[in-house]
Image (cartoon, rainbow, N blue to C red):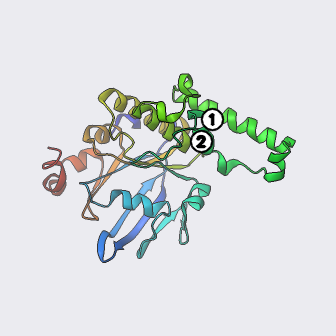
Amino acid sequence: MSENQIDRNFPIGGPILEVNNISLSFGGVKAITDTSFDVLTHEIRAIIGPNGAGKSSMLNCINGIYKPQEGSVVYHGETLSKITPNIAAQKGISRTFQNLALFKRMSALDNILVGRKLHSKANFIDIAFQLPKAKREETENRQKCEEIISFLEIDEIKNTPVGKLPYGLQKRVELGRALAAEPEVLLLDEPMAGMNVEEKREMCRFILEVNDNYGTTIVLIEHDMGVVMDISDRVVVLDYGKVIGDGTPDEVRSNQTVIDAYLGVAHG
């Protein structure tokens, strides 16, 4: 078990998210085949596997980018049958991507403010005439984003255009934007891809603190096995779109099928 299970502020609970027998194909090519696993409340759940194993496709099914041909995603006991990314976000499922999806000419603060869109209730008239509701909302949203900026330790670059920031800081801004939506479940697609050792260490720290301080449930795709084994509570392993292992980091590490298909080959 990982160190973050010691003295945690939010104990792990029952399932918050269930993936039931998901199958997804593109033009006859199977990306995911009859895959099932669950995610427990407040845990850090890792999804690992070789390139092309279906990991990102699985996150896309969970937050409504893809609609699987078979199976279901259940969130808080509710089957998400007509889910879209916007509906998923409204329900409390937020997402980051492999490739940065930031507005490069906007400042770090403005990018994070975009994540508050779901919490904005003021209409066009309120905003155009700067009525009290719009002003109050703007103040609240900015305060929330300032808190996130302080938490992520990026105060010094909050007014800098994102395109001028180093890659590691851009990834931190993207995490901030996802947090601005106040998600219950945070889907992180390779949050440490392209980072150096120090940047990875910092991102690990923030992920653990998000999980422990906010109580956010995290589903994490990551190729760095050291990171996965250090911060995850449980790990599910995909290979060619199928589950070949599921358990604690220690259980997965000693699973011979996983070793043969993945750990012992590409990541020995």
Residue type marked 1: Cys
Q: Which mark is first along the chain, 2 or 1?
A: 1
Residue behind mark 2: 180
Q: Is residue 226 above or below residue 56?
A: above
Distance from label 1 to label 2 (Cα)?
6 Å
**In the image, residue 219 lies at what x, y percent?**
42, 50
Q: Give the label on residue 145, or none.
A: 1
**In the image, residue 4 lies at what x, y percent?**
40, 35
Residue 209 visible in the shown view: no
Residue type marked 2: Ala
Please report contact status of discs 1 and 2: CB closer than 8 Å, yes or no.
Answer: yes
Helix, strand or loop status at disc 2: helix
Please indicate whether residue 147 sits to the left or right of residue 226 in the image: right
**In the image, residue 125 lies at what x, y percent?**
84, 51
User: Residue at (73%, 37%) from the top-left corner?
Assistant: 140
User: Residue at (80%, 39%) from the top-left corner?
Assistant: 136
Residue 229 visible in the shown view: yes
Q: Give the label on residue 241, or none.
A: none
